[in-house]
Image (spheres, helix red, strand yellow):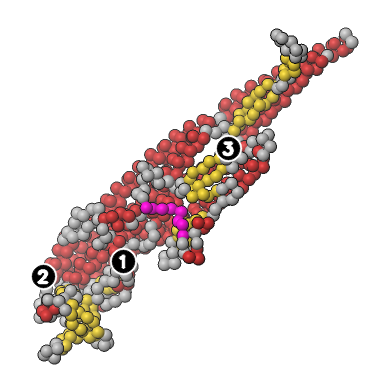
Amino acid sequence: MANGFGSMFIGVAGLQSAQNALNTTANNLSNVDTTGYVRQQVLFADRDYVTFNETAAISKQQSGLGVKIGDVVHTRDVFLDRLYRTTSGREAFYSATYEATTEVETYFQELEGQAFQESLTDFWESFQEFYKAPDDSIYQNLVVQKAQLFVSRASAVFSGLKSYQYNINTQIKDDVDRVNELGKTINELNLQIQKVEAGNIETAMTLRDARDLALDELASLVDISYNETTTGVVKVSIEGQEFVTELDYHEMKLKTDKSNGFVTPYWGYLSDENKEDYTYVFKFDRDISTENKNDMGEIKALLLARGDKVADYTDVLGVDKETYNDTTDMSVMLRAEAQLDQLYHGIVTALNDIFCPNVAASEYLPSLAGGGSVTMTSVGGTTYTVNENTLILDMDNCSVGADGKLPPQELFTRIGTERYTEVVYTDPVSGEAKTYYLYNEEDPNDGTKQYTLRSVSVNDAVIVDETTIPHLLQNGDVNQALAAALAAAWEQEGMILSPNDTKPYNFKDYYAAMIGELGTYGDVFGSHATNLEQSLLTVDNQRQTVIGVSSDEELTYMIKYQNAYNASSRYINVVNEMIEHLITQLG
């Protein structure tokens, strides 16, 4: 009888094990489309054996007690997980950079429908027309109109670039907030997993799935490293600094630049805000490359693409190659803004210098040629120290408008200053007083005093009366040489695209080279992004073969476990009939 009831227990064990296996399989099937779910696999094991005749030398006569579920495996491949997260971080970096480059191309071309390039061409053609008859008000008005259109289109592109910079800035804020949310989530899941698994009886599979999913997303935002402790806690570092610890997580904070509102992530727990001593999350002291293993994470790409300011021509013109490569050239937006503004600055200053030519003060005051200085006084009483390098209006050779006034009108004006300041110099020997016009040079520290997109407009005086455009010699004759110089200015090669491309360009070729360089960068970033996207897909497919749920495979398991359940049930019935027969018929 004991063996009979023992056989009954074996059947029950099989029945229970098959039932639990069916439940696990049903759970897999119900989560086929659940993001981040990892399939669970049942492993069967023998129950304990009952030993009879323990003193026997040959056979101890053991009897098994059936089957049990030894473990439910949470299937993951840690190597594929690390490869996936590394590839995801790099793909996100190049995708974000490529998106920024594409957006810049859109502002230059598609968004404005080629309007900027057309306005540049129209402006050049207006001077070809002006050359035909400089004293014709129709052609003078054409120059003014095309100048206004050129300024309008250039400003629209520049404003669009700035606006996109601030969009990137907002995206950085959102991404940093998301990083902090993920850090909090991982920390909370760590604590919950510890509680569930503390007794070494149950594996917190659902919680682990959620934590792995959070790590996947975090890896696309920043460069992470992580490891799991023996207690089941995952510790995470970002850019080499602790982020999630065994007990807590360190929030990533944002420092806001008061001058432009741009944010920069920093570690609050490593910084002293009162002393303005910040430990920034991202360092850019090394070239960004795969070899240096620092081309990872969307936030880093966005920070690089946005840059740290709104750039202008001073970020290209006169900057050495090393400085340029370590600053402006690292950022898609800074490079585009600086090169566009350099083109604008070059056109504006070239035309203004032809309309209103300057010479060194020593040309009019030979005594300055050997050094030294003199003092000149403005109408308002302000004194100016003038040396041999000080620029003044070339009064003997400049042209004038129909009004014949000096100084002549410039075509483009700065919002912060006039082109000239009228001053008087009194000769200390003869006592003769003579009027000069000091050129107010561009101030590299004051954008309102620079010929830049942020501070230049068409001169209101020539808008009101186009005949005030300089076109006459001071004796009243038409200055055809001036018109010829204006027409030829567009063909003069003198602008370089950057310290990396020192080939001299004229205005038209410069724009083509600028767009060509932008397109080249776009192709490179796009190619990297596409290749990494394919690599990421390949790795994910490999990972899914391990962690993914196949409905066909699970249905096969379900049929197997159903048959096992039926077999155990049938076995129990047979044993039950046998015991009943023994009791009723032989009892």
From the image, tell me which residue sits under label 2: 481
From the image, tell me which residue sits under label 1: 453
Q: Main secondary structure of the magenta part?
A: loop
Mark earlier in primary sequence (3, 1) = 3
**Relative to 545, 495 lies left or right:** left
Question: Does the stretch in magenta take in 206?
Answer: no
**Does dot 1 land on a helix, a strand or a loop?**
loop
Please identify the quarter of the rendering in which residue 198 is found.
top right
**Relative to 232, 581 lies left or right:** right
Question: Does the stretch in magenta take in 283?
Answer: yes
Res 114 seen here: no
Residue at the image point whose x is 24% and y is 76% from the top: 440
- Rendering coords of residue 19 (x, y %): 70, 27
Report crowding for label 1: few under 14, some 14 to 19, many 20 or more residues within 10 A (C-alpha): many
- Rendering coords of residue 295 (x, y %): 40, 46
**Does dot 3 land on a helix, a strand or a loop?**
loop
The residue range painted magenta reads: 278-285
Q: Verify CB contact (< 8 Å) between mark 1 and mark 2.
A: no
Residue at the image point whose x is 49% and y is 59% from the top: 271
Which image quarter holds the N terminus? top right
The type of residue carrying mark 2 is: Ala
Distance between the alpha carbons at the discs numbered 3 and 1: 53 Å
Which image quarter holds the C terminus? top right
Of 434 and 554, the residue lying toward us = 434
Mark earlier in primary sequence (1, 2) = 1
From the image, tell me which residue sits under label 3: 37
Mark earlier in primary sequence (3, 2) = 3
The type of residue carrying mark 3 is: Tyr
